[in-house]
Image (cartoon, rainbow, N blue to C red):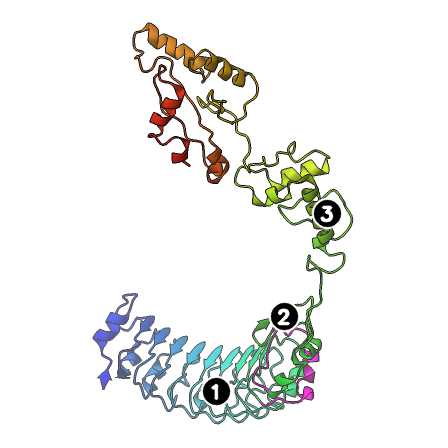
Amino acid sequence: MVVLDRAAVEAADVDGQPWGGALKLALPNRGLSDVGVLGQCHLLQRLDLAHNSIASVQALSSCAALRWLNLTHNSLTSLDGLQSLTSLNVLNVSHNTLSSLDAVTSLHSLNALIASDNELSSLPSLAHLSRLNTLVVSSNLLPSLGTALAACSSLLKLSLSHNDVTSLKGALRGCPALQELRFAHNSAKALPSDLAALSSLRIVDAGHNAVSKWRGVALLAELPRLRQLNLMGNPLTAHPDYRTKVLELAPGVSVLDGRRVDRDYVQPQGEAQPDTGAGGMGDGGEDERTEHKGRPAGGQGDGTPQERTAERRRGYEESGKGSEASGGGAGTASNHERDTGLREGRSAKEAGGARPNGKRKRGPRGDEVEPVRLADGDPTPVSGEKAGAADKGGAKGGPARQGGEGTERRQKKRKAEGKLSAKETGVVKVVLHAEKSVGKGQGKKPARAPLLPAAQPLGAALDVGLGGGGPSSWG
C-alpha cells in the first residue's frame, strides 16, 4: 500500500507552485492506493492518476476546479466523490471494475466520458449532460441503451463496440447531431432504424454483427453524408453482389470495409475487367490521343498505337537498320533521331543512325588523330587529305606526320632551344586499327602505340611497342 504524501505531490508539480497551489499533477505508475492528500489541492485543474491501485476517489471531492481527470487502469468499483466536480470537462475511468455511472449524472460541464472496459450492464439517464459530445462505453456488458441518451442533443461520437447489444431501437432519437456510431462485435440483426433520422452521420461501424438480410441495411439510402461504412464479419457480406449493391444504396461512401472506393467504376464480383486496349482508357481514351513519353508519333496520324508502332517497325526493317537500332551500343543515335529522319524521307545514315560496326564515327579530339592506312598493308580505309599524307610519308621512307601544325611548331621550338632528344625527333603517333577491333573490341577505344624512334622500321616498331606480340596480343 503506497500512500501519496506532500513531498511526492511537490515533486510532481511541474509548475513549482507553493503547496496547495498546484494546477497540474502527473502521478501515473506510482503504485498509489491512497490519494487523500490531494484533497488539499483546491486549485488543481488537471490530474493524471493512471495505472495505479486506487480504489476510492472520495478525497477528490474538494478539488472543485478539476477540468481533466484520468483514472484509467485502477481498482475503482465506484465513483462516489466525483459528484461535486461540476467543472469537469473530460473524465476517463476506463479499465476499472465499475458497475454503475450514477455519480456522473450531475457533471453538467462534461464533454467527454470514457468508461470502456468495465462491468457496466446499464446506463443511467444522461439527460443533464447537455454538453456531452463523446461517449465511449465499449467492452462492457450492455444489452441495450434504453433511454440513457434520450436528450443528448450535443452527442457527436458514440462507441458501443464489444457489448451484448441486440437492438438500438429508439435509443438514438435524442441524438440528432450524431456523426460517428461504432457498435461492432455485437448481436444486432439490422442497422438501427433511428439512423434514418440522423442526417449528419458520417461514420458507421457495424462490423461483426448478425446482419444477413438486405432489408437490414436498406436505410443506408437515407444517409446522404455517410462516408465510411464497415459491415465486415456480417453474413450479408457473403452475397456475390454485396459490394456493388451496398454502394448503390450509399453512393457517397468513400471507404467500405476499410477499402477505398473507386467512384468511376465499381466492378461487380465475378465480372471480368473490360479490355480497354493498350492505352487502358477504352475507345477514344486519352492514351490513344497522346503518345507515350520517349516514343514520338509516327508519320501517320490515324490508327491505334499498335498500328503506328507496327508501321514504324516496318520502316526500320525496310531501311536495313532495324536490328542495329535495337542492338546498338552507347554510340548509336537515339530512337527519336532515327524516327525523325525516317519521317522526313532521309536515310538512317543521314538521321544519325548506327554505322555497320555498331559505332558512330568520332572526330579528332585534342592531339588524337584519325586512323591512317599503314604502309605495310593495314586494311583500315581512310579517305581525304590525311590518307594522302600518310601515303606520301610512307613512300619517302619517313614517318607519317600527324597531330596538326601545333605539334610541329612545338617540336621546332624545342629543337631550336636544344631540348629535343634524339628519340623525340620525328615522333610517330599511330592509332592501330587491326581486324580484331571489328570483333570483341569494337566497343573499346583503340589503343595508342607508344613513342618510337623514327629510324626504326614500322613493322619492327609495332612488334616492340606491343611487346613483340603484334596486333593479335591486344583486344
Magenta region includes residue 384: no
At 46% from the left and 89% from the top, the residue drawn is 140
For the residues carrying marks 2 and 1, which lies nearer the camera in this image? 2
The relative height of residue 122 versus residue 86 in the rendered view (above or below) is: below
Q: Which residue is mark 3?
A: 311
- C-alpha distance separating marks 2 and 1: 42 Å
Of the numbered discs 3 and 2, the one sitting upstream in the chain is: 2
Q: How many marks?
A: 3
Give the x, y percent position of residue 419: 30, 10
Q: Which residue is mark 2?
A: 261
Circles 2 and 1: CB atoms closer than 8 Å: no
**Location of the N terminus (image quadrant):** bottom left
Of the numbered discs 1 and 3, the one sitting upstream in the chain is: 1
| Badge 2 amino acid | Val
Of the numbered discs 2 and 1, the one sitting upstream in the chain is: 1
| Badge 1 amino acid | Thr
Q: Is residue 7 left or right of residue 320?
A: left
**Magenta span covers which residues?**
210-234
Magenta region includes residue 227: yes
